[in-house]
Amino acid sequence: MKIKVLHMLEGADQAEGLTVIIDVFRAFTLEAYLFAWGAEEVIPVGDLETAYRLKEEHPDYVLIGERHGKILPGFDFGNSPSTVDPEKIRGHIVVHTTSAGTQGIAHASGADEILTGSLVNAKAIADWIIQKQPDYVSLVCMGWEGLRNTEEDELCAEYIKSLIEGHPLEDISKQAHDLMYTEGKKFFDPLQNDVFPQDDFGMCIDYDKFDFIIRVVQREGLFHAEKVPVHEA
């Protein structure tokens, strides 16, 4: 198995084989919580026009997303897991658009299979890959808006790779906690708490919390994310 760690939108364009699009702060952490809260399905979209059109066609859909971290006009929730009401998610289809993660999905046209990646289900992702034994694995760190590398996505890729290779990072807990001093410091800045609530940080670094992967498939011109328990591989 050949494992490549790629970066940002350019990396998504280059991805091949089984591809994991990683966005820890916060897109794919949020999607994991959405499924844990009972979302029927998540439709990740790259452009706002598609998101608004889907809401117009299906008023019962829940719109979640951001640009530059901020909730979008007319959306039900922003990209913040701690501010989403689980009761409004259960049984609903969610349309999700962000500056980095969902863009990466749209760019990964060369992938054989696409999974979303975050720390909260990193071990499940690694277990899935070990079971599938693909020839090529692409771990794509989306970073900030797909344009700048960030420590949390790099750590997630390194952790997943270490699990696949049978040498798990021994200090994953400390490294995850220490993200509060690098890219995660925005969650502790009072001037940014309206966009990056402090509670989001703890939810994002709660590694190996969920035992399912999120697989993305394409149907009728749209991407559809689905929750798949790893034991069903």
Image: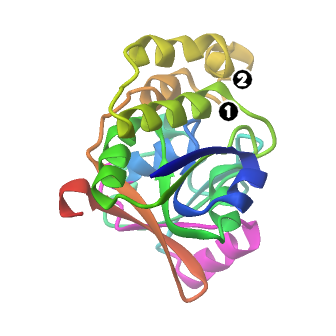
- Residue located beneath label 2 in the image: 192
Of 166 and 233, which appears nearest the observer?
166
Write the residue at 59% across / 46% down: 4
Write the residue at 46% across / 60% down: 135
Of 13 and 102, which appears nearest the observer?
13
State whether residue 7 is above or below residue 12: above
Q: CA distance from mark 1 to mark 2?
A: 6 Å
Mark 1 and mark 2 residues within 8 Å of each other at the beta carbon: yes
Q: Is residue 230 left or right of residue 213?
A: left
Q: Amino acid at mark 2?
A: Gln
Rendering coords of residue 140 (x, y %):
62, 48
Q: Is residue 108 left or right of residue 231?
A: right
Q: Specify few, some or many for label 1: CA neighbours under 10 Å numbering under 14, 14-19, or 20 or more.
A: some
Write the residue at 67% across / 67% down: 106
Rendering coords of residue 182 (x, y %):
67, 15
Q: How many marks?
A: 2
- Residue located beneath label 1 in the image: 195
Rendering coords of residue 139 (x, y %):
56, 47
Q: Is residue 182 visible?
A: yes
Please identify the quarter of the rendering in which residue 107 is found. bottom right
Residue at disc 2, secondary structure: helix
